[in-house]
Amino acid sequence: MPSADGFIKSTAGGRFAATFVIDDLMYNFSGSFASSVPAFSCNTASLSYNAVRQLNSTRSFDGRVGPTTVELRVANGPIITGVLDMPLSPGSTVSGSGVWTQN
């Protein structure tokens, strides 16, 4: 399964943005959590995927944020993981939706 390095950041308003570079192109996954999640950042995130064609359209996700890691499992297969820059306590399960864009 190929992977790419990047980052993910969220705001206290429940929105997030994740960015990864694949073959000199930026792939962004941005969206919102269905429930309240404290603001967090992860500057060492990793995206695992089977094919770049998975990185398109609006997709739902579920996963976990905190206490020390983040994992978002996108519905069509990609997984975003990483260690949080600052721990969150308590950790929580999350879900929501996001849209993939490419620059």
Image: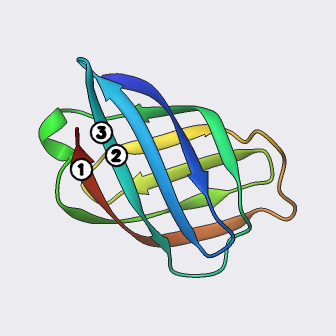
Residue 27's mark? 3
Residue 26 appears at what percent x and percent y? Answer: 30, 33
Residue identifier under label 1 = 101
Relative height, residue 13 to residue 47 (above, below):
below
Residue 17 appears at what percent x and percent y? Answer: 47, 53
Relative height, residue 95 to residue 22 (above, below):
below
Please tell me whether mark 1 sits on a helix, a strand or a loop.
Answer: strand
Quadrant assignment for the C terminus: top left
Please tell me whether mark 3 sits on a helix, a strand or a loop.
Answer: strand
Residue identifier under label 2 = 28
**Earlier along the polypeptide chain: callout 1 or callout 2?**
2
Q: Is residue 58 left or right of residue 31?
A: left
Please tell me whether mark 2 sits on a helix, a strand or a loop.
Answer: strand
Q: How far apart are the two marked residues, 1 and 2, measured between alpha carbons?
A: 5 Å
Q: How far apart are the two marked residues, 1 and 3, measured between alpha carbons?
A: 6 Å
Residues under numbered marks 1 and 2 in contact, where contact means CB atoms less than 8 Å apart: yes
Relative height, residue 2 to residue 80 (above, below):
above
Name the residue located 84 percent from the left edge and 48 percent from the top edge.
87
**Earlier along the polypeptide chain: callout 1 or callout 3?**
3
- Hey, what amino acid is under mark 3? Tyr
